[in-house]
Amino acid sequence: MNTTKLQFKATLAARLGEPGSDIALLKPLKNGIKMLDKDTKQHLGELTFDYLRNAGGVYVACEITGGVVHEVLAGLALPYASNLLNCATMSFNSLSEERKEFSPDIGGVVRVHDGMDIDRTCGEIIERLAKWHIPKMERLLAISDGLIEDVLAYPDHYAYPLPVIAICLIRNGCQDIDVALAPYARNKRITRHRHLDFLAALKEHPLLAPRT
C-alpha cells in the first residue's frame, strides 16, 4: 500500500469518532463505526470501509443487525426469502447508491490518489456519513416516520420491505393499518407477495405498542 493510501486510512480512522447519534452509541473502529444500544451495549449495526483496487478508492457498507425491527422480523414466519444475502434487516453500500450520497463520482467510490487533499476528503466523508448514512440507519432503529420514505426509495436495501413499512405504521399509531398498507402491497417494487398474513402478529406484538 502506498504512502497516500496509508495516510488516508490513518486520517479517516482518526475522524471516525466525530459523528454523533441520539439513537445509538457510535463506537469508532479502525475501518468503520459500530452502532451499539446505549443502555445494553447490544450490537445494532455497523458502517465499514473497504477499498476497491480496480477503482482506486474506498466505499462504505452499512448494515443493521439488531434493534426492535430486527427482533420483530426474526419472530415472523414469513413464507418468502429475504431480499438480502445475509441475516441483516437492512444492508447497503455506496456502490449501489443512485443519489451519490457517499461520493460525487459515478460508482460510489471516493478516489484515493497521489496529490489529493486528504484532510478535505476525509472531512467530506464524515459530513456525508452524518448527513445520509447514519440518519438512515437511525430511522430504522427508531422506527421513525421517515423510515417509510427510505424503504420506498431503496426497497432492495431491506430484508422485508412490506413488513418494515407495516411495523412503522403500527408503531407510529396508524388507526387502520390494513387500509394504509394496501397501496404498498400493490407496489411490485416493494413486494411480489401480496398476502398480509403477518399483520395479525404485528398488531399484537408487545414491542410495537404505539408511542404515547
Image (cartoon, helix red, strand yellow):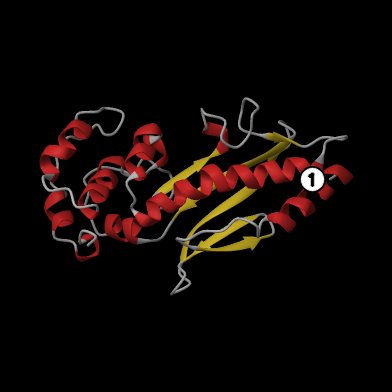
Residue matched to label 1: 119
**Screen quadrant of the C terminus:** bottom left
> Residue 169: x, y in percent?
22, 47
In depth, the one of 82 and 117 nearer the eye is 117
Q: Can the viewer see residue 68 in this picture?
A: yes
Q: Residue at x 35, y 38 (%)?
A: 151
**Quarter of the rendering containing residue 60:** top right
Total count of labels: 1
Q: Tell me if mark 1 has few (under 14), some (14-19) or many (20+) residues whose alpha carbon lies within 10 angstroms of its own.
A: few
**Screen quadrant of the N terminus:** top right
Q: Residue furthest bottom?
A: 40
**Quarter of the rendering containing residue 196:** top left
Identify the secondary structure beneath mark 1: helix
**Quarter of the rendering containing residue 104:** top right
Q: Residue at x 51, y 59 (%)?
A: 21
100 relative to 167, above or below: above
Does residue 174 appear left or right of residue 132 in this picture? left
Q: Amino acid at mark 1?
A: Asp
